[in-house]
Amino acid sequence: MSAEQARQIASVLRLGPGSQIVLVTDGEELDYRLDRVSSSSVQGTVVARRPSAAEPRVRLVLALPLLRGEHSELVLESTTQLGVARFIPYTSSRSMARGLGAQKRRRWERIAREAVETSRRARLPEIGPVMRWPSLFEELEGDILVAWEEEHTLRLADAVPRGPDAVSLVIGPEGGLSGDEVELARRKGAQVVSLGRRPLRAETAAIAAVSARRRARNAPRATAARAPARGDGRGRGRSSACDALSPRRASFGRALTRRSSWSRTRRPHRRPVPCRHPPRPRGQREAPRG
């Protein structure tokens, strides 16, 4: 482990010899017992190892536009926890930010490493070089999905394939993608998809697209099975909401249903109910208590 990790174990977590931690590396989780601990180095013994269950089976590549401020770092942290395996930063004709310096790249790598530790993933995501839009598609892997705010026909949930080894998601910059850039993506074999009826900020769209891809892949296939009809033919017991309640609450709900339908046809005379505390005359103050 690095000196920074040793300092975290000794000074922040305050762990000593005999403590046991979990290390993640190369797709595995290691149960690690600490033998010697100092602020500069840590030595220990691997007690057990097992494959990591937190690493997704499908490799997900995210083409992330360079965003102004800390918006790219928010996307990097959140989508790393959601399972992105590789980031490809890029610029296009409407990008606001144009470069990724060495200092900022080191900060991205640190944020990605901390996100991996938080989610207990077993592999660090790759951060590729900054690409231009025409050469971006040479770096993408598997099926390519480009999210565009002007696409209204094909949804992301309907376009997500269920069998590939890799999927690439492309999110537009703050200024969006131009029509020529979208046509170039189609010629490169990409599918242009919609994330919904509302336009989203670039950082929101990136997190939403990664989450939607995971949800669409893990969702069970819809079935057309129909629930059997219940009731005695006279309108009793037809409410599925009442059937999900306890027997007493279910019968009360059915009684309310019958009473509401009866009150629409007959409106009986309602006698006034005497008030326990009659109202005071206007302008009269309440007597002090006690």
Image (spheres, grey):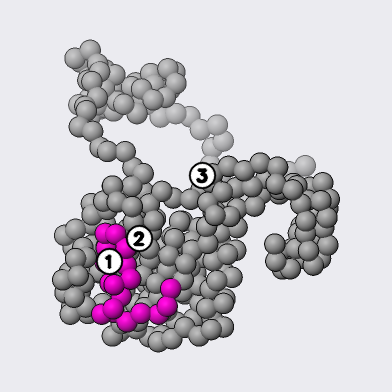
Above or below for 49 versus 171: above
Density class for disc 3 (Cα within 10 Å; few <14, some 14-19, many ≥20) is few
Please tell me in which quadrant of the rendered image residue 174 appears: bottom left
What residue range appears in magenta?
A: 128-146
In this picture, residue 242 sits left or right of residue 229 = right
**Disc number placed over residue 43 in the picture, else none:** none
List x then y, in percent, for residue 233: 19, 14
In this picture, residue 83 sits left or right of residue 179 = right
- Pick the residue in front: 115 or 238: 115
Give the distance between the C-alpha atoms of the residues marked 1 and 3, in whole angstroms: 29 Å
- Pick the residue in front: 262 or 268: 262
At 44% from the left and 50% from the top, the residue drawn is 56
Precedes in sequence: disc 2 or disc 3: 3
For the image, the number of numbered tags is 3
* Quadrant of the image containing the C terminus: top right
**Disc number placed over residue 53 in the picture, else none:** 3
Pointers 1 and 2 in contact (C-beta within 8 Å): yes
**Disc number placed over residue 147 in the picture, else none:** 1
